Image (cartoon, rainbow, N blue to C red):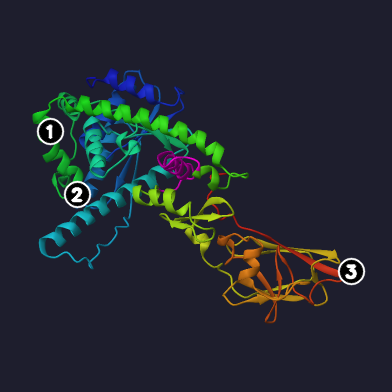
């Protein structure tokens, strides 16, 4: 399809979630050719009365080049000419350091480090941009980005080089949810050459980022070296590759539909994890498809091919309490026949240590980041009210033991295991001490000699646990 104002409007309307006039179209404006064409086209359509939506722009100043401030000024001036409101946001980038311990030497080492830094910068800039975008999205906000078909071709090639599956090879999505609103890319079907022609015909000005010619960036190498070679040999490659993107999108939709069916049959009773026995009934490809889909529904980063295969073939078949796989900021654990996802910070010991709690009346005692303890006065139940006026709240350090009422003394580790306390709670369960004696394990029992006798007042103590599992449940 050739780029024109009418074709832009048609593409936009086909992608908008609804035709409501109160939707705000927020253009991500970098100042480059693509975003300038998009903003100008929308502005003209609004002037012609063909577009009723409110239009605004957002510019992200990454501060990576010395021209960054002048680009921001350019965007502000352009929006002023087009009578479009704009908000500008400066961001700080968290760029990972290179690994200086590599055994590579000379040019090989310098090249590898330089490539790593470039990819780190690209990723940090993207994360920073989307953090700003996410914060700007309301229920009626549509963020418009100016990606075109050449961007799609570059993305497809890069993902193919990285061994992507259907998700990666389905390319840049034309629309997706973002924050409270959605993100739409109405120019994916147009070539950059068509956008350039429009800009020249309308005497538009734009800024040129000199870093776009730096072929240390993988995308620039594809744009300036690899794809021109492909086009010289196969001039219509864009049409052929676009078919691949469409076919992979269909394949992805089918995979996700199958995964949703499998997920419904494999979720455990309270939908907090997957039933391992049911998952293991699936063959390996279908199992990996389910696991990948499940992680995506939880909003967790993909494991990648190698660790996903390890999860499918090894972790799910391992013994209870020994099966664990680390993801990016989370861990996957097997427990009592189910696979659970737990954020890494949930697996650490609770923050509060050795707190003093005076039991004088029914109350709630908040624990920093660890739920709360709730006490209630009962008769013949719980901790003896006479023997446990002041308690110390501590957490498991290792080596503790407890002589629960009516049972032999055992190590705390064994007690927690026998009572099926989840692995992610064992370092967080608040333990109640009188002096150096462990007298109560909430939810499990009270120590010998501290149990309220029949007819005696006692404190029943319950622990309201924090939400540590990643479940996707609201």
Left or right: 22, with 127 as reference point: right
Find residue 471 and name its label: none
Mark 3 secondary-structure assignment: loop
Q: Which residue lies under the disc numbered 1? A: 230
Q: Which numbered disc, 2 or 1, marks the residue closer to the eye?
A: 1
Query: Is the N terminus in the top left, top right, bottom left or bottom right quadrant?
Result: top left
Determine the residue positioned at 23% across, 68% down: 101
Left or right: 391, with 116 as reference point: right
Q: Which residue lies under the disc numbered 3? A: 454
Farthest right residue in view: 455
Left or right: 304, with 380 as reference point: left
Quarter assignment of residue 169: top left
10 Å neighbourhood of mark 2: few (<14), some, or many (≥20)?
Answer: some
| 319 w.r.t. 280: above or below | below
**Of pointers 1 and 3, the one earlier in the residue sequence:** 1
- In 3D space, how far apart are the residues under numbered discs 2 and 1 (Cα atoms)? 33 Å
């Amino acid at each position: 399809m050739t780029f024109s104002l009418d074709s832009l409007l048609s593409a936009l309307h086909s992608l908008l979630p609804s035709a409501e006039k109160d939707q705000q179209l927020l253009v991500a404006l970098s100042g480059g050719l693509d975003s300038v064409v998009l903003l100008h086209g929308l502005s003209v359509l609004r002037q012609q009365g063909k577009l009723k939506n409110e239009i605004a722009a957002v510019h992200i100043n990454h501060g990576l080049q010395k021209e960054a401030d002048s680009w921001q000024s350019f965007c502000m001036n352009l929006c002023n000419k087009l009578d479009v409101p704009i908000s500008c946001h400066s961001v700080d980038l968290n760029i990972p350091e290179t690994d200086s311990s590599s055994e590579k030497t000379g040019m090989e080492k310098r090249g590898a480090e330089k490539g790593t830094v470039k990819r780190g910068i690209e990723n940090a800039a993207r994360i920073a941009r989307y953090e700003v975008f996410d914060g700007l999205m309301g229920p009626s906000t549509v963020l418009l980005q100016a990606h075109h078909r050449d961007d799609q071709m570059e993305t497809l090639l890069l993902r193919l080089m990285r061994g992507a599956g259907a998700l990666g090879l389905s390319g840049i999505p034309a629309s997706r949810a973002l924050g409270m609103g959605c993100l739409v890319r109405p120019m994916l079907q147009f070539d950059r050459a068509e956008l350039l022609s429009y800009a020249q015909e309308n005497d538009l000005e734009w800024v040129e980022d000199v870093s776009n010619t730096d072929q240390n960036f993988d995308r620039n190498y594809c744009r300036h070296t690899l794809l021109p070679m492909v086009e010289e040999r196969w001039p219509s490659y864009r049409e052929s590759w676009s078919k691949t993107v469409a076919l992979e999108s269909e394949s992805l939709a089918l995979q996700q539909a199958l995964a949703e069916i499998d997920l419904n049959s494999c979720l455990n009773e309270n939908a907090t994890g997957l039933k391992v026995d049911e998952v293991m009934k699936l063959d390996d490809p279908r199992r990996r498809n389910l696991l990948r889909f499940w992680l995506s529904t939880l909003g967790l980063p993909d494991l990648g091919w190698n660790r996903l295969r390890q999860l499918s073939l090894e972790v799910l078949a391992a013994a209870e309490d020994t099966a664990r796989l680390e993801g990016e900021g989370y861990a996957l654990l097997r427990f009592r026949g189910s696979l659970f996802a737990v954020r890494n910070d949930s697996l650490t010991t609770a923050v509060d240590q050795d707190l003093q709690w005076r039991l004088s009346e029914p109350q709630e005692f908040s624990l920093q980041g660890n739920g709360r303890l709730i006490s209630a006065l009962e008769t013949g139940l719980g901790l003896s009210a006479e023997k446990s006026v002041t308690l110390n709240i501590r957490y498991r350090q290792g080596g503790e033991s407890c002589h629960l009422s009516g049972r032999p003394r055992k190590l705390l580790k064994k007690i927690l295991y026998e009572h099926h306390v989840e692995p992610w709670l064992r370092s967080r369960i608040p333990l109640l001490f009188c002096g150096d004696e462990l007298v109560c394990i909430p939810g499990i029992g009270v120590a010998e000699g501290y149990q309220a006798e029949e007819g005696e007042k006692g404190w029943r103590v319950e622990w309201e646990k924090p939400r540590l599992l990643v479940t996707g449940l609201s």
